[in-house]
Amino acid sequence: MEDVTERILAVVNDEMTEVERAQAIDAEMKAIKTEATEDNSYICKVKSFYEGNEFYMFMYERFSDIRLVGAPPSSVGKYGGDTDNWMWPRHTGDFSIFPNLRCA
C-alpha cells in the first residue's frame, strides 16, 4: 500500500470543473496503474478515500496455479479413547506452506 495522494492531486487545480477534475484524476490513476504493473505480475488498484481527498495504491499478487499436494487423513487429530495416554484432543499433523512456490 502506498499513498499517492500528492501525485494525483498535483494534476488538478482550482479552475477545473468537476468533470475536468474527475477526468484528470482518472487519467493519473490509470498512469499509476500502468507504471506499477508494466514489469511484473502484480495487480494494482488505486482507490480514493475521504471523498477524494486521499488516494492509495494497493498492490496484489495473484496466484493462479494453486495445487493441493496432499490431504491429511481424517485421523490427524486424536480425540481421546486411550485411557493411559492422549486423553485430550490434540493436533498431531504436520503441515508446510512454501513461500514463493519453492520448497526449502
Image (cartoon, grey):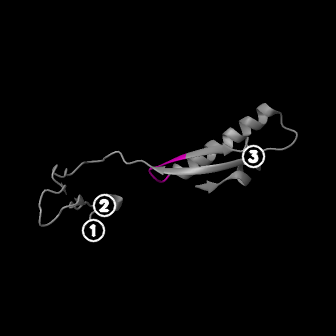
Looking at the image, tell me whether mark 1 or mark 2 is earlier in sequence order. 2
Q: Residues within 10 Å of mark 1 (few under 14, many from 20)?
A: few
Q: Residue type at mark 3? A: Asn
Q: Are marks 1 and 2 in contact (CB under 8 Å)?
A: yes
Find out whether residue 41 is within the magenta segment: yes
Q: Quadrant of the N terminus?
A: bottom right
State the extent of the magenta-drawn residues as a range: 39-44
Residue at mark 2:
98
Looking at the image, tell me whether mark 1 or mark 3 is earlier in sequence order. 3
Q: Residue type at mark 2? A: Phe
Mark 1–mark 2 distance (CA, rounded to whole Å): 7 Å
Looking at the image, tell me whether mark 3 or mark 2 is earlier in sequence order. 3
Q: Residue at x 76, y 46 (%)?
A: 11
Secondary element at tag 3: loop
- Residue 104 is tagged as 1
Mark 3–mark 2 distance (CA, rounded to whole Å): 40 Å
Residue at mark 3:
53
* x then y, percent, for residue 40: 46, 53
